[in-house]
Amino acid sequence: MASHFTDAPSEQEMVDLEKHDCVERVQWVLNTPKPPGLGHELMETAFSWKNKIPFLNKKSGWKGELLSMLQGMFPILSWCQNYKAYKFKHDIMAGLTLASLCIPQSIGYATLAKLDPQFGLYTSVVPPLIYAVMGTSREIAIGPVAVISLLLSSMLQKLQDPVANPIAYQKLVLTVTFFAGIFQAAFGLFRSGFIVDFLSHAAIVGFMAGAAIVIGLQQLKGLLGITHFTNKTDIISVMKAVWSSFHHPWNPHNFFIGCSFLIFILVTRFLGKRNRKLFWLPAIAPLLSVVLATLVVFLTKADKHGVKIIKHIKGGLNPSSVHQLQFNDPHIGEIAKIGLIVAIIALTEAIAVGRSFAAVKGYHLDGNKEMVAMGFMNIIGSMTSCYVATGSFSRTAVNFSAGCETAVSNIVMAITVFISLELFTRLFYYTPVAILASIILSALPGLIDLNEAYNIWKVDKLDFLACIGAFLGVLFATVEIGLLVAVTISFAKIILISIRPGTETLGRLPGTDMFGDVNQYPMAVKTPGVLIMRLKSALLCFANANFVRERIMKWVTEQEKDSKGIAEKTIHLVILDISNLMDIDTSGIASLEELHKNLDSNGMKLAIANPRWHVINKLKVANFVDKIGGRVYLSIGEAMDSF
């Protein structure tokens, strides 16, 4: 027993052992392998899809590779293997309900895009079929939407007048659709979905609300039966056009028909929300309104008394439009730019809609596959007389409420619309234009989310500034300016945060080995002679390096003053926790070197704690570690113990 106690290490030996372990852990930090370079990271980001395609992945076996590749490209091959009869029953009901809403909306959105009505129906046939094969969402309903229709008409009419030269305008729309599809597919294939995030959630909320009001104002032309109306989208120009129209003869019958059925649609929507079993009522209300309004006009010969009607809608299968794509147009650069803007807006809306309903059903939505699916459906759509299609929130909500199980509901909807194109387009001849305006107006309240705008205001004032900037820009200027204002404010926020990064003074939390901000945790204990600071920025670069250095020196100076403001030499070590710092450039390293010189001239030492992989590698290459005497530690605690 005595020999056992004799063999136990002494207190000094324990201290030496701990110091040895500390030195060894410091070597873990200093002797890390070289991190991957920028080129490797870019290649990995851009081409990580190669690992998902068996033929490009050498590690995978050849058994079942073809099937695996096809399932990756066409998700329908995966879920169709477990497709049951009861699911088909639900999908048929959902698809038919969806078609009853889709047909009148598609005609209305085509007129909003300044296209002939049949183009809206064409867009509800081919894109949904392509998406059903390639998409990963079970609920999303594909087709034309109000915001995209407004975007196209507002931006393209500057290049070509849709009234004076409708054929040339139609060709521009199809070409923009092709470019939008190319951009969307490229985003997905090269895993560049982060580009979509350039439009923040707050900016989208404001943009959608502004666009909804602009779309509503544009419908006054159809609702009031105005012949001459402005092509501008801002609220001032539209209100001037409405006011001037009252000084000319106008027919109140259009207004009466439109408002009557608008009230009917809104009442059915209210009843559908009150009683979920009546979900089908607001879904069929637009089509029922079209049928009833068309009968009224036909029986009363109201078109002879000033009621504006749709007249001829070209029927039949989607005609090929490959020859209409204009790649030699003198405005090709502007067309491509519009295609990029439309692609981003369409993807943002579709992925937001898809993810919200996927979260309810509890499954994962593959964002990159969604982008590829959207891209290919618009590329093929541009060759089959379709304009830009995306996911519609209102129709997706109807699809979800109708109990859809899979994307087969989109197939059923597309087939139903195709049958309507083949057999029933003549029946829409007497459909009043006012009823299309009322259908579009009834869909707009869903685009204005006042509760979300209020939540943005409560959470982040800068985000709310982006939201209100997008809203006012769309409302009082143009759609492009609204988007530009939102993106500018969002980027300004990022730049402001990166240029003015926060720093925290840390103290040890009582009874723990953890360190926290002394302002957040007033009970945190500061160690005499040591100032511990943490950078809250993920990047120390030319934009913020001098600010960080000056901020740290200011804190050091303030900490060294006593209650009377007299400087005292109380700090001997400054520990800089850079655990949040993901990267650093040469300006950042230069600022740290200057900080070290300033501290050293005042008799203080600088130590670095918990550096990230790329940061410590650059600090070693720049010989900064040697300049500070190798004071680089795995944690703040070890830096304290070493001191």
Image (tube, rainbow, N blue to C red):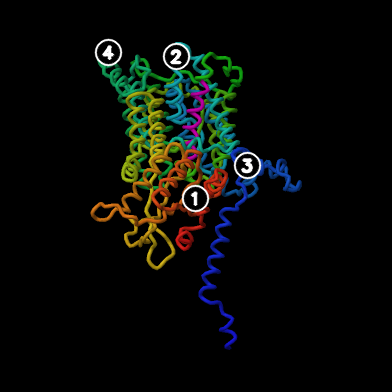
Q: Position of residue 53 (x, y in %)?
A: 68, 42
Taking the image as shown, residue 138 lies to the left or right of residue 493, namely: right
Residue type for callout 4: His
Whether residue 209 is visible, yes or no, is: yes
| Residues at discs 1 and 2 in contact (Cβ within 8 Å) | no
Find the residue positioned furthest to the bottom: 1
Residue type for callout 2: Asp
| Vertical position of residue 104 compared to residue 42: above or below | above
Q: Position of residue 346 (x, y in %)?
A: 48, 32
| CA distance separating discs 4 and 1 | 83 Å
| Vertical position of residue 410 compared to residue 600: above or below | above
Q: Residues within 10 Å of mark 1 (few under 14, many from 20)?
A: some
Taking the image as shown, residue 75 lies to the left or right of residue 533, namely: right
| CA distance separating discs 2 and 3 | 44 Å
Q: Which residue is denoted by mark 1 in the rendering?
A: 628
Q: Which residue is denoted by mark 3 in the rendering?
A: 48
Residue 344 falls inside the magenta stretch: yes
**Disc on the earlier residue, 2 or 3:** 3
| CA distance separating discs 4 and 3 | 63 Å
Image: magenta residue range: 335-353
**Disc on the earlier residue, 3 or 1:** 3
Marking on residue 248: 4
Residue type for callout 3: Ser
| CA distance separating discs 2 and 4 | 24 Å
Q: Nearer the viewer, mark 1 or mark 2?
A: 1
